Amino acid sequence: MKKKVTATVISQKEISPGIYDLWLKTELAAYAHCGQFVGVYTGNDSRLLPRPISICEISDDWSAMRLVYRIAGKGTADISHLKEGDSVKILGVLGNGYEFIKIFGEDLSGAKDVVLMGGGIGIPPMLQTSKELSAHGIQHTVICGYRNADLFLNQDLAKYGTLHIATEDGSWGVKGNVLDVVAQKGIKTGVILACGPMPMLRAIKKYAESSKITAYISLEERMACGVGACLGCVCKTANKDEHSNVNNARICTDGPVFKSSEVMI
Amino acid sequence: MMNTSVNIAGIEFKNPVMSASGTFGSGVEYEEFFDLDLLGAVVTKGVSNIPWEGNPTPRIAETYGGMLNAIGLQNPGIDVFIKRDIPFLKRFNTNIIVNVCGKSVDDYIDVVERLSDEDVSMLEINVSCPNVKEGAIAFGQDPKALYNITSEIKKHAKQPVIMKLSPNVTDIALMAKTAEDAGADAVSLINTITGMKIDIERRSFVLANKTGGLSGPAIKPVAVRMVYQCAKAVKIPIIGMGGISNAEDAIEFLMAGATAVAVGAMNFVNPTAMPETICGIEEFMEKHGIDDINEIIGCVD
Ligand SMILES: Cc1cc2nc3c(=O)[nH]c(=O)nc-3n(C[C@H](O)[C@H](O)[C@H](O)COP(=O)(O)OP(=O)(O)OC[C@H]3O[C@@H](n4cnc5c(N)ncnc54)[C@H](O)[C@@H]3O)c2cc1C
Ligand SMILES: Cc1cc2nc3c(=O)[nH]c(=O)nc-3n(C[C@H](O)[C@H](O)[C@H](O)COP(=O)(O)O)c2cc1C
Ligand code: FES
């Protein structure tokens, strides 16, 4: 379901320097699944476009969703000022998300050696993904890459999968990135589900190609409509895209999650 | 019973509100938000004779009270459009206006001819897209070129022709008059205003294309002024657009002389902006005892 709705802030707090944890009460939660996102309006008429933010977690009763985001500019700064009880307009639910049936097959039998990889502000969507995998009884590994020891969401993530941590400066866990963890710990990778900065996604695409496994990666692009109408948010595809009739897919509707072999990044 | 219907080149519109080309796809994406039957018309994304890939990304940059876009007229080409988009739109009780783009006069004529047997209400000719390097905008900035392309298209078009004007000119009224003289059945304006945004941290352009077209509330006063100037200069109907968010904005354009209005970038901000605008116009008419919307068209003087 897609709708612009008014959500109510349940709580908001800063969980790491510049990283905010926002719980919203919204009817949209009931229609969402892992890897999807919502457009959050800034409430400021000079900044009109909704900010795309991934769904980090959905409450067990499907009445609320959690967004974890970094202040990247003025729009996210506006959003960080929201307090308990405030209203905020959101557009959702947007994007395909991680579609388990498509990824693992009808009976989910393809879900072997599943590894989730999150880098930086790409970590939040991995929480709901991990939660849904465990709800299906699918054992999995979660690897998170942080810049330094300012970790966030690590305690939540440890609940559902086997968690490994990498930091760029080596101040926690493995020194290096998520793929360094795979190499050092000898983690078996059957299917990778990933979200993070472009260099990390490029490395995962290469890794998947060379080790002949499948990886699903979540991409980002500047968006206007968020619903597939404006063609602002495209990425290059390996084959002709059915909707566009050229080698461009819309990240907001055909993605943000793509099979790594299908996109040219 | 109050009348909200308007007439453009013999085509009846149940109300004067339609989508602005390129902001509404072919309607598919907004069907989830409201019933397209409510609209006066759906104006489609620009379509060319062959598929176009458009520009590299980033294609979008938000600006104060508006946005820049440099999509570069990505579209699936007329063949897919006729097979897929027209049949979709035929399911609704609304007018279909197909927006046409091209790089040469022959490209435009190719598309116009392919549409001649299709059941669409009108053609809107985009001679003003600032995001395509070759051709397109030159037609919209040079009166001679505009006259030539308008008269050529009129020779081949089966449906009434709307020429969509660029605001990136010195004298918009001259362009409207030129289109009228060349046989256009209506004009629409404004297309986006060419702009630029620079990322001062990265010391580079925000858009891959460097420049983009500005749209949204930030451009509304310019658009209202241009509609007013054109209304004074021509007798053919005008479809006004540029920053319309709601009924008040729409009524401003009607009073400036537009027979109908289109909503563009604000569809992205509020997916139900158009049905809300239509309701708001009716409320305004009721409140002010206006029986026929045509009474307020061009009423300022
Ligand atoms: C599908 C998707 C999911 C995302 N999920 C998250 C998340 O869970 N947590 C999080 O912290 N961030 C996430 N982002 C990035 C987030 O959207 C941007 O950080 C945010 O839009 C910045 O807005 P701003 O006004 O603070 O920054 P400004 O730079 O002032 O924004 C200016 C404009 O650029 C756009 N923009 C800027 N950076 C980005 C970006 N990286 N991606 C897309 N648009 C951008 C803004 O939306 C706005 O329209 C996601 C992006 C996408 C596309
Ligand atoms: C993303 C985007 C795509 C557009 N694509 C087209 C197009 O294909 N053809 C066209 O004639 N105008 C196009 N336009 C211009 C709009 O139809 C309209 O003239 C302009 O945006 C001003 O109206 P607004 O301020 O309400 O958006 C586009 C505008 C936007 C924002
Ligand atoms: S943001 Fe408009 S098509 Fe994706």
Image (cartoon, coloured by chain):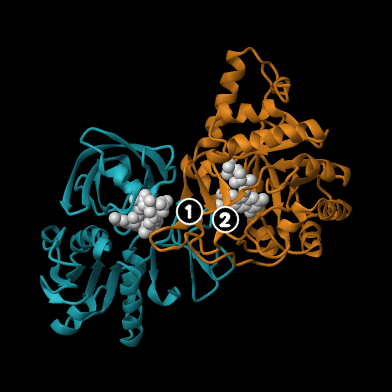
Chain colours: A cyan, B orange
Viewer can see residue A174: yes
- Left/right placement of residue B270 relative to residue A8 reads right
Which residue is located at x 34 percent, y 63 percent?
A99
Q: Quadrant of the C terminus of chain A?
A: bottom left
Instruction: Specify the quadrant of the image occupied by residue A11.
Output: top left
Which residue lies under the disc numbered 1?
B61
Which residue lies under the disc numbered 2?
B212
Ligand 1 within 8 angstroms of badge 1 C-beta: yes
Label 1: state its secondary structure. strand
Determine the chain carrying the residue at label 1.
Answer: B
Q: Residues within 10 Å of mark 1 (few under 14, many from 20)?
A: many
Q: Nearer the viewer, residue B202 or A64?
A: B202
Determine the chain carrying the residue at label 2.
Answer: B
Which residue is located at x 58 percent, y 14 percent?
B287
Instruction: Specify the quadrant of the image occupied by residue B262.
Output: top right
**CA–CA distance in space, label 1 to label 2:** 9 Å
Q: Are marks 1 and 2 on the same chain?
A: yes
Q: Is there a contact, CB below 8 Å, between mark 1 and mark 2?
A: yes
- Left/right placement of residue B241 relative to residue B122 reads left
- In the rendered image, residue B180, in percent from the top left (x then y), is placed at 84, 42
- In the rendered image, residue A253, in percent from the top left (x then y), is placed at 45, 57
Above or below for B276 versus B25: above
Ligand 1, seen in the image, is in the quarter at: bottom left
- In the rendered image, residue A3, in percent from the top left (x then y), is placed at 41, 42
The mark found on residue A192 in the picture is: none
Which residue is located at x 13 percent, y 82 percent?
A185
Above or below for A1 versus B285: below
Label 2: state its secondary structure. strand
Which residue is located at x 29 percent, y 58 percent?
A34
- In the rendered image, residue B157, in percent from the top left (x then y), is placed at 83, 52
